[in-house]
Each structure stands twice: as structure tokens, then as C-alpha cells.
Amino acid sequence: SIREYIGGLFKGTLAVIPPPSPADMAKHTKTAFECSPLAADQSPRNKEREQDNPIPAKVGDGSPIKYCIYIIKENRTYDQVFGDMPQGNGDPTLVQFGRDVSPNHHALAEQFVLLDNYYGPGDQSALGHRWILQAFPSTYVHKYGNGRNNQSPMLLGPTDAVYDSAKAHGLTVRAYGERGLNTITPSTATWTDMFNDWKNGTHNVNISAQAVIIGLRDIYHPSYGAAESAIPDVLRAETFLQEFRQFEQNGQLPSLVLLLLYNDHTAGTSPGFPTPRAQVADNDLALGKIVDAISHSRYWKESAIFVTEDDSQDGLDHVDGHRTVGLVVSPFTRHHAVNSTFYSIVNMFRTIEQILGLPPQNQYALAAQPMFDVFTSKRDLTPYTFQPNQIPLDEMNPAMASLKGRQREMAKFSLAIDKSSPDSADADMLNRAIWHSVKGFGTPYNYGRPIARRHDSFLSLLRLAGN
């Protein structure tokens, strides 16, 4: 069978193509221009755009949307979360975190728009976060795999990140947790300690965060938790909401907000950590509470919330291993809709640029169509009310002493994962640990259903990036 898990998609190819004649080259050039998503003036072709669409036709044109909140999550496929939604193109046999685990993801997709043909070009986090922030991973990251969360300039793409561009164009930006490192005091603090701080309103654990990348340091929240599975997402959400309440009072919400919600990555079956479904439920509740607060605020009428996974490395999908979870939440979103337009993270990136009046940073962003057909000029100000979690957030993985056989081996593997470094674990093993945690250790691991054709990984990447 064909595995539509990202780690099984890589195949090397070599092609020998005879050089075209000058006459053939002229024909090919004409065809390329006809197929280009760009008009002659380099603006996107606007076939899907209403005349009064809130997404501007050209960079610099006005938009009724003044605030973009860009929420970044970790590693889930579409089928893992939305495969149980009958209105979309899902496979319910691959669902691991369905409505019972992620009621807010489901409710948001139903109240606003379900994107069932949305993809992440990256195959793991070093690529995924570069696509999200720059729409351009460097050649170094492609060649050398998962470059870690460090300050190496080789990790960054050659063009400005969206936060650099926004600052250069005079916009205000605030970053929460994305591309940062934590100092946690006491250093022995556990997930339970921090969860109890959130639950009881105490402050026994101190979190200090610093941006890794220099361009983020002047806009970084100093106590919002960066990547670290021991920090509950509901605690991250409360830290954000404390500052958001201040913005409600002073009217100074930044034009662009970058916000990391990390814990749908999970810690596998590590003893001392919640089960994978509990960590995804934590992530879901945090997202729901953030959207609830924004939608009941003074800023809602001029806001758009964009939610994406950085990549879809840790899961299976029956369409393609790159297909992932994306949400667009706004009064201007087409409500109660299913949108099957082929979109990727780069389209979402370009849409944010277009709203904020930022010129495309590179060829990938330039060629990507803004998500015109996701939006409508008919503003619906109905707010969103968060759904309570159905899975206990403190449903814990079993202790090592109680485990035997495969379950014990999975727990030992999970314990060895660097919990503060995205995608540092062997992805296939982590997939198996999560699968068996949810489905049971007696349930055979599902490699995904065969599909009619395999996507060539290189061509697929180009197609996803340049759509």
C-alpha cells in the first residue's frame, strides 16, 4: 500500500530532457505566461474576487480588515482532525483527534469555513516555520533537513520575514512564543506544576522567554511560553489574553500578531505528560478561548484570524501527506462554507500581506493567489463562543512501571524526545506512539489507504509553494 504519511513520500528522480529549439522555447514561454497566476502588472489574477471583496485586489489598496492574528500550531494532518466531518473530503478511519477531542476546531470550521484542500509545503518544522514566516525556506534547510531552532543565518530564507516587512512598513507587531527559548524556574517544574498554576490562578512557576531570531526580539512577549511540551497551551492562552485585555483598554492592538500554540505536537506517550489526545484537547481549548475573546472584543469587526499547522509531519492523510488543518476566522469569512480551492500556507501568507499592504517578499508569495474566495464583503459580526473540553486536560500517560512490551518501548522512546525542540523525534515512531495511544496498542498501525497516483515529492513541493 502507499503510505500518505510525509516520511513515506520521498523518492529521488532523475530526468534527461533534450533542449528545446528556439521556436519551441517561444511556444513554451507563451504557454508559461498564459498559465501564470500573475497578470501583466504582476498583480494576482482576480477571477475569483468580488469587486468589493475585503482582500484588496492590489497591494496598497484599502481593506476593512485592520488586524491579522496569525496562529501557528504543530504537525497535524487534515484527516487526523477533520476526517470525521462528512461535509469535507475526509477519511474517518484516520481520525485521531475528532470532535470529542477538538470541539473548537470543528465548531470554528462549521461556523466559518472548512478548508478541505489546504496544504503545508514543509515536511518538518524547520521548513514549516520558514514557509509560515517567510514563504521561502533556505536551500540549507532543504539539503540538511531539520535545522534546529537556532540562530544560524543559514536557517533563514533569503528574503524578509512577514514581521520584518510589517515593521519596515510602519506597522506594529507582537510575537508570542514563535521561534523562542524558555527559561523555566524552578528548572524542575513539571507539566503538572504549570497546569496547576493555570487551574488555581497561582504563580509557582516562572516562565521567561526570549526570541531566538534577532528580528523578533523587540516585539517578543517576555513570559509567553515558546516551544515546550511541559507548558500547557491554556496557560499560553491566558498569558496572551492578559495582554489582550490591556489592548482592549488602550486601543493599541498591533496590526500583526504572531502566536504559537504548540501542544498539538504532543509529547507522545511520555510518562509525566498528558496523553496525546489530552494535549490536543488542551491546544483546542486554548484556540477556542482566544477566538472567543477576540470575537467579543472591540477589534472583531476589523479582524481576521488565520490558523495553520506548521507542517503535517506527524500523521496520516488519505489525499496527500502535506494536507493539513487551516482555519480562517473573521466577520468577512464566508460563514457555514466548505472551500475546496487548492490552498497552501503560502496563500495564507500572501493573504496577510495583501490585507496589511505588504508587497510580496519573494517569487513564491508573488505567485500565490490571495484567498479571495474565502472572504465576502457581507460582514457577519456573530461572535464565537468557545466549546468546553470533553477530554480531561490532565488525562496522563501511564507510569513506566505499569507498562510492558510495545507500550513500554513507545514510552521509553517518547521520554527521550527533546520536548522543547519541534520534530526532534523520529517521526514514524512518534506517529506510532500517538496512533496506539489513541486507537489502542492492539489496533494495527494504519499506513493510509492507497491512492490512484503518488505525488512526486519534488513536483508536489513546487506545486504547493507556487499555487
Image (cartoon, rainbow, N blue to C red):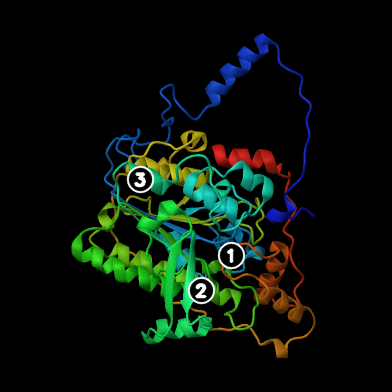
Query: In the image, what residue occupies the spot 59% across and 63% down?
Result: 422
Where residue 138 sits: x, y (%)? 58, 43
Q: Would residue 132 appear left or right of 78 to someone viewing this image?
A: left
Query: In the image, what residue occupies the spot 27% across and 39% down?
Result: 62
Query: In the image, what residue occupies the spot 66% across and 9% down?
Result: 23
Question: The disc labelled 2 sits on which kind of residue?
Answer: Ala
Mark 2 — residue?
A: 281
Question: The disc labelled 3 sits on which kind of residue?
Answer: Ala
Mark 3 — residue?
A: 166
Where residue 280 sits: x, y (%)? 54, 71
Quick one: quadrant of the N terminus? Answer: bottom right
Mark 1 — residue?
A: 421
In 3D space, how far apart are the residues under numbered discs 3 and 2 (Cα atoms)? 33 Å
In 3D space, how far apart are the residues under numbered discs 1 and 2 (Cα atoms)? 21 Å
Q: Would residue 300 appear left or right of 438 to someone viewing this image?
A: left
Rendering quarter of residue 294? bottom left
For the residues labelled 1 and 2, say whether their Cβ atoms are less than 8 Å apart: no
Is residue 433 or residue 363 the one in the foreground?
363
Q: Residue furthest bottom?
A: 401
Query: In the image, what residue occupies the spot 74% across and 61% down?
Result: 447
195 up-or-down from 242: above or below: below
Sequence order check: which comes first, mark 1 or mark 2?
2
228 up-or-down from 253: above or below: below
Of helix, strand and loop, which one carries label 1?
Answer: loop
Sequence order check: which comes first, mark 1 or mark 3?
3
Q: Is residue 4 visible?
A: no
Of helix, strand and loop, which one carries label 2?
Answer: helix
